[in-house]
Image (cartoon, rainbow, N blue to C red):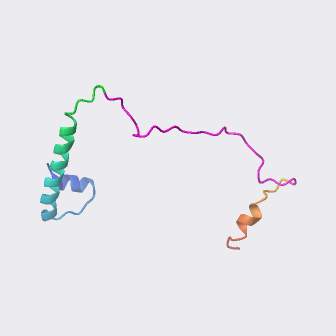
Amino acid sequence: MDIDHIAKLAKLDIKKEEAQKLKKELELILGYVEKLSEVDTKDIVPTGHSIALENVMAEDVPINQGIRENGKVEFRDELLKNTKKI
């Protein structure tokens, strides 16, 4: 495993002492991942999340909220009152 190459790809400035430590740590991590790939998961249903989630979507209905009878946006003045005057 070439830690110097990985560091270069990640644009990291790593000293030789750090590289040796990181190499050992990365080898341990990859060894663990390899062990996980040995686990029999053929009867396990794939999930995206451990808790059943459901998107709740509101119907997309246009509304005229914020419009005055004269067609000006009701909250425009409120939004603009804190802006810098040019």
Spot the residue most to the right.
70
Left or right position of 6 against 44: left
Residue 3 in the image, given as x and y percentages of width and height:
17, 54
Q: Any magenta on residue 49? A: yes
Spot the residue most to the bottom.
85
Q: Which residues are magenta?
A: 44-70
Residue 14 in the image, given as x and y percentages of width and height:
20, 63
Q: Look at the magenta stretch and give its main secondary structure.
A: loop
Which image quarter: residue 20?
bottom left
Which image quarter: residue 17?
bottom left
Q: Residue at x 75, y 45 (%)?
A: 63
Q: Report the quarter where the C terminus lies.
A: bottom right
- Looking at the image, is 40 positioned above or below residue 7? above
Left or right position of 43 against 64: left
Q: Residue at x 18, y 51 (%)?
A: 26
Along the viewing direction, whichever of 3 and 68 lies nearer the viewer: 68
